[in-house]
Image: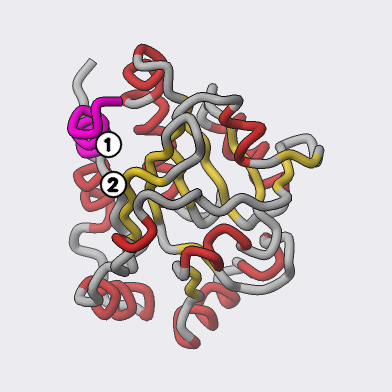
Amino acid sequence: MTSTPIADEVSAPHAGRPESAYSREQVALAILPRPDLSGRIGQPFPDAALLDVHREPTSLAAAAAGSPIVVVLYRGAWCPYCNVALRVYQQQLVEPLAARGIRLVAISPQHPDGSLTMQEKHALTFTVLSDPGNRIAEDLGVVTQPGDESRALQLENGLDVAATNADGTPRLPMPTTAILDADGVLRWIEARPDHTTRTEPAEVLAQLDALGL
C-alpha cells in the first residue's frame, strides 16, 4: 500500500478554490509560531474525566492500560482535516505502533456521538474519546476557537461547532500529537496553530525511534 502524506491528501482537494474567510484565517494561522511545550517534557501528561464512544466515563490512564501511548488531540468529526488525519493514522500508524507495544488514542471536545461517528466512518480500531470542556488541551495551553468571520461562515453553512462540543462552546484544541511513556510521562509533543496541518505518521515513528520506544 502506498503511503500518502497527510499534507498531500489535505492540499489536493483545496487547490484552486476561491478565497474565503476560511482561507484567510488559514493564511493567518500558518504564520503563527507553534506553542513551545518543551517545558512539559519529562512531566506527567494531564489527564481528565473523559467519555468513551458509549458515554461511559474513562480516562487517559485507563485507555493506556500501562502501555506507552501516542495521543492525538483533534477538533471533531465535522473537521475534514481531522477526518483525513485519523484515517491516515489508522492506515499508517496503528500496526507499526502495535508492533512496538504502543497504543494510539484520539481525543476531541465533541459529544461522544461524534466520537462514535468518527470511529465508525473510518473503521478506526484505536481508542477515540471525548474530553468535555477541553480539559487536557486547556492544561496544555493549546485551546483556540474559530475567528468571528469563520464562525459566521460556518453557521451560514449549517455548522455550529458549539453544538457539536460537549461543553456548548466553540473552543477547540490545536491539532496536537504527544508521545507518553508507560508511566504517563510526556516524552515528545507538538501542537499546530494551523488546523489544516497535522503531524505525519513518519514523524511520529521517527520520534519513537529517537526515544527508544
Indicate the secondary structure of the residue bearing disc 2. Answer: loop
Q: Is residue 7 left or right of residue 109?
A: left
Q: How many marks?
A: 2
Q: Is residue 193 left or right of residue 180?
A: left
Q: Is residue 82 above or below residue 213?
A: below
Q: Residue at x 31, y 46 (%)?
A: 188
Residue sitting nearer the eye, 157 or 150: 150
Residue sitting nearer the eye, 86 or 64: 64
- Give the image's coloring scheme: secondary structure
Indicate the secondary structure of the residue bearing disc 1. Answer: helix
Residue 28 on image: x %, y %: 26, 80
* Amino acid type, residue under disc 2 in the picture: Thr
Near mark 1 (Cα within 10 A), the count class, few <14, some 14-19 or many ≥20, is some
* Amino acid type, residue under disc 1 in the picture: Val
Residue sitting nearer the eye, 142 or 28: 142
Q: Earlier in the sequence, mark 2 or mark 1?
A: 2
Disc sitting over residue 204 in the figure: 1
The residue segment tinted magenta is 201-213
Q: Residue furthest top?
A: 99
Q: Main secondary structure of the magenta part?
A: helix
Residue 4 on image: x %, y %: 21, 32
Is 209 inside the magenta-drawn segment? yes
Disc sitting over residue 213 in the figure: none
Can you identify the residue that label 2 sits on? 199
The answer for how far apart the CA atoms under marks 2 and 1 are is 7 Å
Q: Is residue 89 left or right of residue 143?
A: left
Q: Is residue 76 above or below residue 211?
A: below
Q: Residue at x 67, y 73 (%)?
A: 169
Near mark 2 (Cα within 10 A), the count class, few <14, some 14-19 or many ≥20, is many
* Residue 173 visible (yes or no): yes
Q: Residue at x 49, y 49 (%)?
A: 44
Question: For residue 17, which quarter of the picture?
Answer: bottom left
